[in-house]
Image: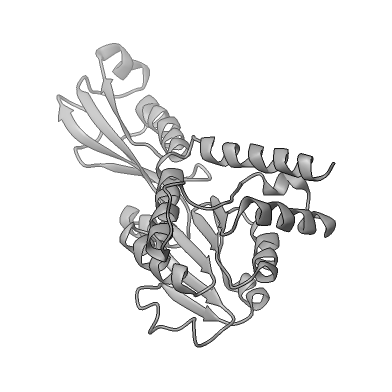
Amino acid sequence: MDVYEELVRLRRSGQKCAIATIVQVNGSIPSYESAKLLVREDGSMVGTIGGGCVEAEVWNAAREAMETERSHHMTFNLGQDAAYDNGLICGGQLNIFIEPVLPQPFAYIFGAGHISKSLSKIADLAGFATVIVDNREQFASRDRFPEAFSIFAEEYESAFPKLEINESSYIVIVTRGHRDDMRVLGWAVSTPARYIAMIGSRRKTINVIKELEKEGIPRSAFEKIHAPMGFDIGAITPEEIAVSVVAEMIAVRRNPDSDWRKVTKSIFINEAYRIRSK
């Protein structure tokens, strides 16, 4: 199996992987410069960088790279003792670069109004493939969203099963009304999406959550939502709001270990809900 073909296949299917490449060699090693090893999320491998203890350590590092989404270098000195223990006739040094390969992030934008137009354009420029979903054909059109990866002009519930939501997915809810926002949010919190955001005030967010709780969705399901959506930069216009939301999406994308923004909002939602419930 070709390493490059498998890398492309995994990326298109929304799966992570990591690729390790021998980038520098000094002396004798059991492989060659530019040799590659691809490690999938399930731990299976394609290719080789020579086997033995080196490959075992690189496998562990590749799993860590996928988890942290950060690349790093490793250096191995294959001294005579190490070579003898592993049955290898070598004694050189090799440097290996390990790089996580992530699927392209998709931004699923529910609602095709003015904010969505700007949001789709800016998200596309920032590297997100955008998918537009709206039940109004005159709004969800290619003329309004020429940069979109795909467009669904149909009822939200009929579109849900057609959307491939995974850990590289970003969901932004900006429909034309609270009822539609609530329908989409109820579905969104059941998905593995990395980012879920909804337009509206804090009061609206609390009311929507209360209604969805009545339908049996537990409070814990809402802890991962970003609402109000976007960074607080004083945005007023659709373009400014889009910038604030995409900035927040980038922060979530580039800092996978940081939940400070989500936690801050969740604390507010829980506290405000407690006060209003008295």
Give x and y (percent) for residue 181: 64, 66
* Residue drawn at x 20%, y 37% as measured from the top left: 32
Residue lying furthest left in this view? 26
Q: In this view, does 58 lie to the left or right of 77?
A: right
- Residue 213: image quadrant is bottom right
Q: Is residue 272 left or right of residue 7?
A: right
- Residue 25: image quadrant is top left
Residue 183, compared with residue 78, is above or below; it is: below
Give x and y (percent) for residue 99: 33, 41
* Residue drawn at x 78%, y 40% as measured from the top left: 274
Figure quadrant of the C terminus = top right
* Residue drawn at x 42%, y 30% as measured from the top left: 56
Residue lying furthest bottom in this view? 138
Q: Decide which of 217, 66 is in the foreground and name it.
A: 217
Give x and y (percent) for residue 122: 35, 62
Give x and y (percent) for residue 216: 83, 56
